[in-house]
Image: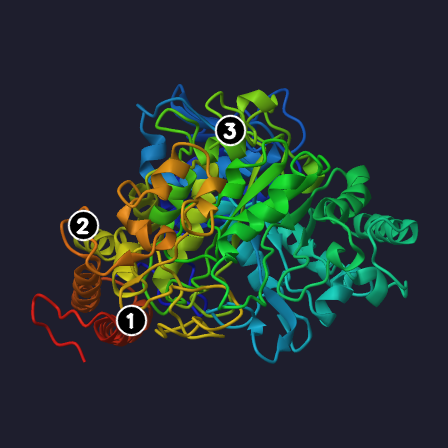
Amino acid sequence: MPDTPSPTIHPAWLPSSAFRALGSRRVRIDAAGPLADTVRAEVSRACSLFGGALVPPEAPADLILTTAPAASGGGEGYRLARRGAATVVIADGPAGLLYGMFEVVRRGEAAFDPALPDERHEPAFGLRVLDHWDNVDVHPVMGQVERGYAGGSLFWRDGRLRDDLTRVGEYARLLAASGVNAVTVNNVNVHAGETHLLTDRLGEVAAIASTLRPYAIRVHLAVNFAAPVILGDLPTADPLDERVRRWWSDTTDRVFATIPDFGGYLVKADSEGQPGPFTYGRTHADGAGMLAAALAPHGAPVRWRAFVYNHHQDWRDRSTDRARAAHDHFAPLDGRFADNVILQVKYGPIDFQTREPVSPVLFAMPNTRLALELQVTQEYTGQQRHLCYLPPMWSGILGFRATGDNAPTLAALLSGAPGLPAAAGAPAAAGSSVAGSGAGPGGAASGRTSGGGVLSAVSNVGDDPFWTGHPLAQANLYAVGRLAWTPDRDPAAILDEWITLTFSGAPDRLRRTLHELMDDSWQTYEQYTAPLGVGFMVRPGHHYGPDVDGYEYTPWGTYHFADRDGVGVDRTVATGTGFTAQYPVPWSDRYESRDTCPDELLLFFHHVPYTHVLRSGVTVIQHIYDTRFAGAQRVAEMQSQWRELAGLVDPAVHARVTERLAEQLRSAEEWRDQVNTYFYRKSGIPDAKGRTIH
């Protein structure tokens, strides 16, 4: 059983027991400053629990936490090594001291092994930010948190900042322990209440910043492009109008006067009804450039989302393709964005689906700073009612090599962007994509240094006692920070690390079962939902549960084109929308041909007959039947496996996961039956195995 009773708020991956190894030692901290004080408070608390002690300078110690003699600024890297009889963390700066301390916590007793290797640690991505889609006022459709599946906002309640920000401080602690260093505190869809956070409600943002700051977390703010009209009484928000530019400059100066370490702006413009430069006949480079000019004196960036597409599409028009939109809008603007503009690109060309190809925009703009955007909140992957461990998906995206097996990975390209200045929330760097020479976002041909890129992710956190609604969804939140530090880390190893921290002293049986439940849970979810990369098939609006034709005749551009003969979207150059041409060779060629297109993406790129034979040797229709049945059956097995863990985990955790797995099984069976029945009725081809299809 756990060594502490169930708390009101679950400690996630930082239960007191995780600090046992550190807290039972003599620890010396040779550093000063606010972040060193945070480290000192963490160590002091651990020692009070487990019998260790903070020792004075020069006293013998088992663990020494110090900064390098030449350290200055916010350096995040550190060295972990043995020096004589002590383990030492030698940090590049105060933030590195904090991250090094948490690495010791992760290692546990292994951190004090005399054979501990000498290791250098530094983050691959300089800015590692969680974007909260939290609304100040409860939205009549989306609620307190848009696409939030874990209760209300940590920051806002009843239209105002929460009175007690204690839990925000605990959140900062969790994020620092996973490696995240920035948070956007409001929705990218900036409604009326959030618009005012930039001016007359800036004090609320400052209060959050003060709460996050002790753990090296900087605040970012999503802003409304039309703010000069709404807040400044100007007749226009034209980014080339000098009055508008002056308004943004003056407003931004006031932001930094209030929050000197403010991280920067996030903008969603000209997308899904949000205002933007198109209103004035301007480009996205013009709009982003205006904000970049206001932020540049403060050394901060504007992150400008590339999620721009026509959401009033005529479903009858087979030539219009939502997948093409971001590339069509932004690739021609390469080289026209200011240096402190970061174009934030969703990992796929559609919208956070369970299976998409990597967005071609990420390989098409070698002269533009790019950020990869992931979705930790499980909008299309079960909404934290279903168990779905996402790092295997993310790892495949980060490891994608677009120009061949010897090409740089996407993570290598993106993390090679120039280091962000300290005010932006990341220090300057210390030291499947484009052309084979290595040119690309941050590639060798760009002359950029390593370690300064940006990885952003939509948060999955709310005020639920378990933070993420589903207790096991905490692993996704933990893993996104860890992958931002080390993109090539094995997702199973990250999961094991999370298990070790969260279930301290977990017996082998618990550890083994959690891996069996979680390692392949993303693929299990895919098995019973939309097949072979076709996407969506969800209920419109809330996006939960099956509705195969839910979006088929809508303006949203998310179609599967199933008919009596076949299914899938023809995105080829030869006969379709031409989307395959947006990829570099060899992937443009691989995706163009049915014979070489990966099966898991076949229906994303091709409309094929139901009798088309996959590499597995089965037809498309039989694959649909087989995988729907297999996925639902696997969830039933997961439910039984979890039931057997009663007594090995906190009863409250066990009860919540049991409830979620029951809903997952109900939903998986509904997905199985609706998808199978739909395609049986479309194709008229029965299941070769004679199973019940309604």
> As shown in the figure, which amino acid type bears the numbered disc 2?
Asp
Cα–Cα span, label 2 and label 1? 26 Å
Residue 216 visible in the shown view:
no
Instruction: Identify which residue is drawn at 47% across, 48% down.
Output: 347
Residue underneath mark 3: 78
In the picture of the structure, the residue carrying the numbered disc 1 is: 664
Seen from the viewer's position, the closer of residues 518 and 380 is: 380
In this view, the residue in front, 582 or 294, is 582
User: Looking at the rendered structure, which numbered label has been put on residue 395?
Assistant: none
In the image, residue 295 above or below residue 688: above
- Residue sitting farthest toward the front: 575
Task: Name the spot of residue 468 as percent of width and height, x first.
Answer: 44, 64
Which callout, 2 or 1, points to the residue nearer the camera? 1
Query: Please, what secondary structure does the residue beneath circle 2 have?
Result: helix
Q: In this view, does 202 lie to the left or right of 269?
A: right
Observer-nearest residue: 563 or 663?
Answer: 563
Question: Identity of the amino acid at label 3?
Answer: Tyr
Quarter of the image containing the N terminus? bottom left
Q: Is mark 3 on a helix, strand or loop?
A: strand
Q: Which residue is drawn at 19% across and 58% down?
A: 611
Which label's residue is closer to the chain start, 3 or 2? 3
Cα–Cα gap, marks 1 and 3: 42 Å
Q: Nearer the viewer, mark 1 or mark 3?
A: 1
Q: Mark 2 points at which residue?
A: 508
In the displayed orientation, state which residue is furthest to the left: 689
Q: For the C terminus, give its image quadrant.
A: bottom left
Residue 574 sits in quarter: top left
Q: Give coordinates of residue 104: x percent, y percent.
A: 42, 37
